[in-house]
Amino acid sequence: MINLENDKLYHLLLRSLEEDLTLEEQQILNTALQEHEALKKEQQRLISNRNLLAGQVFEFSDGFEDRVMTAVGQIEAAKGKARPFDSSLAVAFRRVAVSGVAAILLLLALTYYHHQSLSVNALTGLSNLEAEDLNLYYSIEL
């Protein structure tokens, strides 16, 4: 009797389901399947499970990916692993983007409060500009 969990033949069987084996490996597997009934039953079980799952369509709730990645991050942090750079960069970008959007909205609200408009002149500060201010600006020598 073979031990399916630790046996090289079992790993060979698993590989045969996912990729093409070399001619030598295929012959070894075929011989083992003929000699070991347990391996043959396991092959049939794996193939039937594969066929059952092949037609399944899985739908995940909103935020599933974020929850999974958070859980993976917590497990890695518990093991003492650092976050990869691209993941840290994405988190930093989100924080900066949220605070930047908040600052822009606050500035737009203040501009609207002072000028009662969000026109280009109000946004650039030119709404209170008078003709004398332009004359003064162009008359100053640098």
Image (spheres, grey):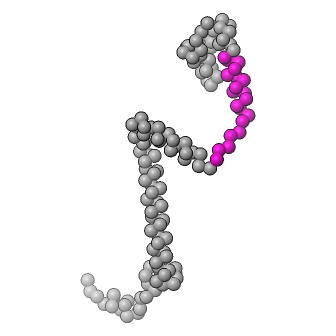
Residue drawn at x 48%, y 61% is: 98
Q: Majority secondary structure of the magenta segment?
A: helix
Quarter of the image for residue 38 reads top right
Residue drawn at x 43%, y 53% is: 92
Looking at the image, residue 33 lies above or below residue 104: above
Looking at the image, residue 108 lies above or below residue 141: above
Number of on-image labels: 0
Quarter of the image for residue 135 reads bottom left
Looking at the image, residue 17 lies above or below residue 110: above
| The N terminus, quarter of image | top right
Q: Does residue 30 show up?
A: no
Q: Nearer the viewer, residue 121 or 9?
A: 9
Q: Which contiguous range is marked in magenta?
A: 42-61
Q: Percent position (x, y) of residue 75?
A: 47, 38
Residue drawn at x 43%, y 88% is: 128
Residue drawn at x 64%, y 47% is: 61
Looking at the image, residue 119 lies above or below residue 39: below
Q: Percent position (x, y) of residue 137?
A: 33, 87
Quarter of the image for residue 53 reads top right
Q: Nearer the viewer, residue 139 or 96?
A: 96
| The C terminus, quarter of image | bottom left
Any magenta on residue 31? Answer: no
Q: Percent position (x, y) of residue 4?
A: 59, 14
Any magenta on residue 52? Answer: yes
Q: Percent position (x, y) of residue 109?
A: 49, 76
